[in-house]
Amino acid sequence: YEVIADELQLVETALARETSSDFPFASDILELLDSGKRLRPALLLISYKTLQNLPTPNPQPLRCTSIPVNLAVGIELLHIATLIHDDIVDDGTLRRGVSTLNAKHGSGLSVLMGDHLYSKSISLFVANGNMEALTTIAHTATQMIQGELTERLSNGNMNLSESEYLDIIRNKTASLFSACCKIGALVGEASNSYLVSQRLISLRLKSLTDYGTYLGIAFQITDDLLDVCGTANNLGKYTGSDLKEQKMTLPLIYAFRNSTLSEQNELKLGFQTQNIELLRPIFDKYKAIEYSVGIASEYVVKAQNSLTALKDSEFKTALLSLADYVIDRNS
């Protein structure tokens, strides 16, 4: 994030401002915020800078009250709200190496806190006056909920197809990545719209929106892989949580699709009893982990190829590098 280090520091200041005084347990929110990667605000800000990186008569430095910074804060608050609600639904006790709000305060207060952060997020979008950005985030929130609902209804369904799985993660995860890039692009283009044609604006918006979608899919596949292959220290949460929640992920879908009937019965037993050791030999036999890494890598390449319409800059380079990071990370 070096190219937006100053802007991200403004986001940190604004996040502290938005969460410091309202809550009876604000310190718990700040602890959760402090453990985050800030990937989504970074995507918004880099996308903004990518398209704002044009000659302007009087370029102005960002401030902690600037529109891009406030929208990045709104994105992060929305993301944190979804994590709080996820932990309630999944009865999670550990998130990013710290105890969840649900574990500390119970589901009642946690639901209200998630709702409060969500309303703060929307308020920031409304206050900054960009109707297209507000429309984008409202549509994205709907997509995310649809993805979570579809996944929940699919829990335990070992006949879930790969395309159905990809549809779920496109909605529940990739939609927010895409929205970050699109919103950053919208605000960045707004500062330069008098310099370029509408056709070029549309092309740049599509490039960054597609980049975010493909990046988000690669991110979620990798996240699911880390739940199988990672360690609790790396992940900051208990491994095997997807198995505990009976979520179908790509390695399991691929192994089940390619295995024999007896092996499918073994996979079912491991899945139903939440015994990952019963799954590993069949994963290894069919190279399910390697296959899933390959699919994630394909989406990283798609993300990077989406940026060909953008002119070369340090910000475009940052987006290209960020795509590689998404599948190389260990947490």
Image (cartoon, rainbow, N blue to C red):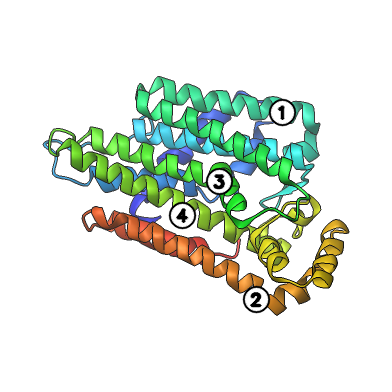
* Front disc: 1 or 2: 2
Where residue 19 is drawn, which disc sits there?
none
Which residue carries the number 3 mark? 173
Residue at 36% x, 56% y is: 319
Q: Residue furthest bottom?
A: 285
Which residue carries the number 4 mark? 215
Residue at 36% x, 50% y is: 4
Helix, strand or loop at label 4? It is helix
Helix, strand or loop at label 2? It is loop
Label 4 neighbour load within 10 Å: few <14, some 14-19, many 20+: many
Q: Does any portion of residue 263 appear in the rendered image?
A: yes
Q: Does any portion of residue 318 appear in the rendered image?
A: no
Which residue carries the number 1 mark? 111
Which residue carries the number 2 mark? 287
Question: What amino acid is labelled 2 in the image?
Answer: Lys
Report the Cα–Cα distance between label 1 and label 3.
20 Å
* Front disc: 3 or 2: 2
How far from the left and from the top, in percent, is residue 194? 13, 33
Question: What amino acid is labelled 4 in the image?
Answer: Leu
Label 3 neighbour load within 10 Å: few <14, some 14-19, many 20+: many
Q: Is residue 201 above or below residue 98?
A: above
